[in-house]
Image: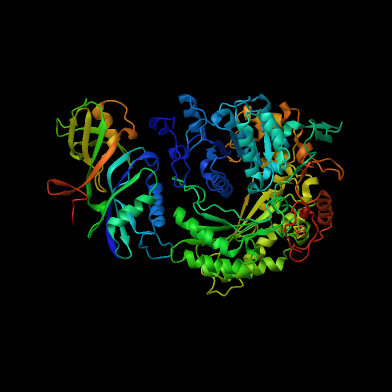
């Protein structure tokens, strides 16, 4: 068994499907490409495949990541090419490499989101920014400021670095709405990169080793 | 695509409306532009084998680009209106108005209002007579096209029979007519001589005082008096690809058509007559298709489709061969459980699906008298043995399918459904205590019988919905065992289906009224409104009972009589009489009953 990490991006019609549909579509691609994927044990075996972080409906992604277990070693440079020929429209495979240790899902801590616009609200100004947030037990005032790590703007292109892990997660659409002080639709946003956190540093997942 | 991302994100599951699926065919526009229209939701249409087959069949032609069109849900319709976007074909995003031919598949009567909705969303007039020379030709096929009359006014032509038979001829003719600059009318005249083609505008109908049909004949010269079903003696074509939807469809799997037609001759089953004779695909070909299609789609399931799959003469070998492909690839093979015979249990043991699912059995009727009337050819001992075997192999959930309202059915017959279910429960307790690992559950599902054209019951009266409901209450009150659950179909939907299924041309007005009053997605219980249909009949001056609940005289001209489906009217009538006396007719392998279908088969082989 070989654990590999796949870097890809998602665009086109794929922005219109949810996480579970994407999981199926990705699995179908792996099957068409006849990659020697490994399966889970049990009565309903499934491909050992997981994603770093579900992408909200409507968004596209720049660098996105999946973990896959293969039954045996293959030439990973070739695998990228083979997968690309079987990929659905809008899915671009960048690279595949062997990996060890924790899954991307558990190491992902933040994400960069980009969108075009003009900053109206200075979210970085203070240590506190309270918004009402829906939780299981009703609406609760929540300080979102600790989940905002950076906001930059160059030539009308805004980049937000927000908490985006299984532990802490800040909704990029909600945040962008406040930032731009206007309605924002998910399709305006690209999730450009995912990072693991090492101390104070954020490492893109393709540079990160456990 | 004409809808903005923003607009698409306002609807549920927008991927239904954007195309871009794996294996979708994109061509340049300089071709015959065909829109395959499925008058139901994307998820339903994409699960339909006929769509996959005809899509790739037409697209194998250099000169044709076949695209798909589905019925948008209400939220999407709203957005399309707001954004001023007419119904478009998924591949090109072009409005359906710009295509050359729109072909609707009529799978069930309750989709008729969706056809009208799609035409209107496409900016087209509903009636063929009101559409112009620049509008596309609009045609229809599928099982409901075997009684085309209720929808006749909306279509330019119907295609009756096997798609592979003469579709090429029609497209060739279209190319020729287009090249010569001929009119729609000229094209329609040309194709009347092709098997399977019915052009309603070239025929007229007269009625007697009592409302029945007096005459039906061509009103222009040099066209045939009737329509002969298009027929392929051998099933050779099967697609090498399937479209793979991005959103989850009803079925996400490779479906293999094992056979077309059926050798059994159950008297209520339209498919059992209109697809005769039984034509099987070879085991090697099927295995190759499965292999191809799995690598072309990446699906995780293979399913076997036929009216009675276990009757395939190579069924056991086929299952073995398929398993050699599916097992190593961790693909599941699902078997339809039409008959619980040895072949089925052999297969199911090999596929090891026992623990996973419940088992469906269709006795159709609880009493032997009724089972004989419908020619089910199944004894109570067969059913109970089958269920016992099922329990022994580890099933503990059995679904029994029945039909309520069969001709000559009496209260005792209805009670017999429950009694049979009780005996099935008892069969479970024949297992040893150790074998009974889980509590048994038997569900009784009753559908309301709808008499259909080209069946022996085409003369029969349908039970009216009030009586259906009384029957349903009777079944319910008779259930004493807690292991039995009872489910039944809506009698009111069945009533409307009953009217449409055996209707004539006059019904088009009622269908239009219903649509104008908001009828859409009538096959979906949450959208169906019975009173809306009753009002539509009233506005159109139509008595629904005349069509649904009236027994026809033997010599009555039926609206579909002008179609030569192969099986003769004399044979069907004979079967109707045998049904009345509960006399069985042996299946085609045992003894040919001379149904007459060989006349259209042009030397094709048949059983018997
Ligand atoms: S001709 Fe005979 S064998 Fe063939 S379908 Fe008809 S009844 Fe069956």
Residue name at image x 78 percent, y 62 percent: B592
Number of labels in the image equals 0
Q: Residue B283's quadrant in the figure?
A: bottom right
Q: Toward the viewer: B40 or B55?
A: B55
Residue B352 seen by the camera: no
Q: Residue B442's quadrant in the figure?
A: bottom right
Q: Toward the viewer: B422 or B54?
A: B54
**Which x, y percent locates residue B324?**
49, 68
**Which x, y percent locates residue B235?**
63, 55
Q: Is residue A25 above or below residue B26?
A: below
Here the colouring is rainbow
**Which x, y percent locates residue B539?**
72, 26
Quadrant of the snapshot with the C terminus of chain B: bottom right
Quadrant of the snapshot with the N terminus of chain B: top left
**Which x, y percent locates residue A146?**
18, 39
A114 sits to left or right of B570: left
Residue name at image x 48 percent, y 43 percent: B25
* Quarter of the rendered image showing ligand 1: bottom right
Residue name at image x 85 percent, y 41 percent: B556
Q: Toward the viewer: B577 or B42?
A: B42
Residue extending furthest front? B180
Q: Is residue B65 above or below residue B6?
A: below
Residue B527 seen by the camera: yes
Residue name at image x 56 percent, y 61 percent: B286
Q: Is residue B279 above or below residue B148?
A: below
Q: Residue A78's quadrant in the figure?
A: bottom left
């Amino acid at each position: 068994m070989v654990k590999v990490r796949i870097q890809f991006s998602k665009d086109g019609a794929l922005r219109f499907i949810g996480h579970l549909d994407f999981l199926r579509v990705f699995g179908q691609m792996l099957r068409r490409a006849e990659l020697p994927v490994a399966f889970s044990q049990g009565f309903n075996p499934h491909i050992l495949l997981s994603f770093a972080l579900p992408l909200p409906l409507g968004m596209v992604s720049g660098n996105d990541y999946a973990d896959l277990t293969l039954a045996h070693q293959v030439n990973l440079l070739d695998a990228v090419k083979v997968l690309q020929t079987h990929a659905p429209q809008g899915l671009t495979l960048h690279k595949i490499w062997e990996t060890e240790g924790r899954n991307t899902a558990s190491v992902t801590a933040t994400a960069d989101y980009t969108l075009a616009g003009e900053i109206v609200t200075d979210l970085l100004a203070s240590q506190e920014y309270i918004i009402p947030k829906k939780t299981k037990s009703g609406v609760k005032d929540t300080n979102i400021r600790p989940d905002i790590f950076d906001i930059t703007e160059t030539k009308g292109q805004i980049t937000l670095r927000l908490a985006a892990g299984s532990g802490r997660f800040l909704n990029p659409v909600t945040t962008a709405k406040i930032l731009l002080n206007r309605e924002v639709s998910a399709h305006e946003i690209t999730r450009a990169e995912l990072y693991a956190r090492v101390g104070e540093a954020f490492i893109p997942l393709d540079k990160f080793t456990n | 695509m004409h809808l903005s991302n923003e607009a698409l994100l306002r609807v549920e599951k927008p991927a239904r409306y954007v195309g871009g699926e794996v294996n979708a065919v994109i061509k340049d526009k300089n071709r015959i532009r065909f829109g395959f229209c499925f008058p139901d939701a994307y998820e339903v249409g994409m699960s339909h084998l006929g769509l996959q087959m005809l899509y790739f069949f037409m697209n194998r032609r250099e000169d044709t680009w076949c695209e798909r069109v589905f019925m948008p849900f209400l939220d999407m319709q709203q957005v399309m209106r707001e954004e001023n976007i007419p119904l478009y074909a998924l591949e090109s995003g072009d409005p359906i108005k710009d295509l050359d031919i729109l072909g609707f598949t009529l799978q069930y009567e309750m989709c008729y209002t969706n056809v009208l909705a799609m035409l209107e969303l496409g900016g087209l007039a509903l009636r063929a007579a009101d559409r112009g020379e620049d509008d596309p030709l609009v045609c229809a096929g599928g099982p409901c096209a075997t009684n085309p009359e209720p929808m006749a006014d909306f279509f330019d032509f119907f295609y009756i029979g096997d798609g592979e038979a003469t579709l090429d001829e029609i497209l060739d003719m279209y190319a020729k007519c287009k090249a010569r600059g001929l009119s729609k009318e000229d094209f329609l005249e040309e194709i009347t001589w092709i098997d399977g083609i019915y052009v309603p505008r070239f025929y007229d109908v007269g009625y007697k005082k009592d409302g029945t049909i007096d005459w039906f004949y061509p009103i222009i010269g040099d066209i045939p008096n009737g329509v002969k079903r298009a027929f392929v003696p051998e099933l050779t074509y099967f697609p090498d690809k399937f479209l793979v939807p991005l959103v989850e469809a009803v079925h996400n799997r490779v479906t293999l058509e094992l056979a077309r037609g059926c050798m059994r001759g159950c008297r209520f089953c339209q498919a059992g007559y209109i697809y005769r004779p039984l034509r099987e695909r070879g085991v090697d070909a099927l295995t190759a298709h499965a292999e191809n299609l799995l690598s072309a789609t990446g699906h995780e399931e293979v399913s076997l489709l036929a009216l009675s799959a276990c009757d395939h003469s190579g069924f056991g070998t086929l299952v073995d061969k398929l398993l050699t492909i599916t097992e190593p690839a961790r693909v599941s093979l699902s078997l339809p459980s039409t008959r619980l015979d040895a072949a089925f249990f052999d297969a199911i043991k090999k596929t090891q699906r026992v623990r996973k699912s419940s088992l469906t059995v269709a006795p159709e009727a609880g009493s032997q008298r009724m089972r004989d009337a419908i020619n089910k050819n199944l004894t109570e001992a067969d059913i109970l043995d089958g269920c016992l075997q099922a329990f022994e192999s580890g099933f503990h959930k059995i679904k029994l399918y029945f039909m309520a309202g069969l001709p000559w059915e009496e209260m005792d017959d209805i009670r017999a459904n429950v009694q049979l279910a009780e005996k099935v429960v008892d069969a479970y307790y024949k297992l040893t205590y150790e074998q009974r690992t889980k509590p048994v559950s038997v569900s009784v599902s009753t559908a309301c019988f709808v008499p259909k054209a080209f069946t022996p019951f085409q003369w029969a009266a349908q039970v009216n919905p009030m009586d259906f409901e009384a029957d349903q209450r009777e079944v319910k009150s008779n259930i004493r065992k807690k292991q039995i659950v009872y489910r039944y179909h809506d009698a009111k939907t069945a009533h409307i289906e009953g009217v449409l299924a055996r209707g004539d041309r006059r019904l088009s007005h009622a269908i239009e009224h219903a649509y104008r009053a908001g009828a859409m997605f009538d096959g979906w219980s949450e959208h169906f409104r019975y009173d809306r249909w009753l009002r539509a009949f009233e506005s159109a001056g139509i008595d629904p009972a005349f069509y649904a609940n009236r027994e026809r005289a033997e010599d009555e001209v039926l609206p579909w009589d002008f179609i030569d489906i192969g099986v003769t009217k004399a044979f069907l009538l004979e079967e109707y009489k045998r049904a009345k006396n509960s006399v069985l007719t042996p299946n085609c392998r045992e003894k040919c009953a001379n149904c007459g279908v060989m006349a259209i088969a042009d030397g094709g082989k048949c059983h018997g």
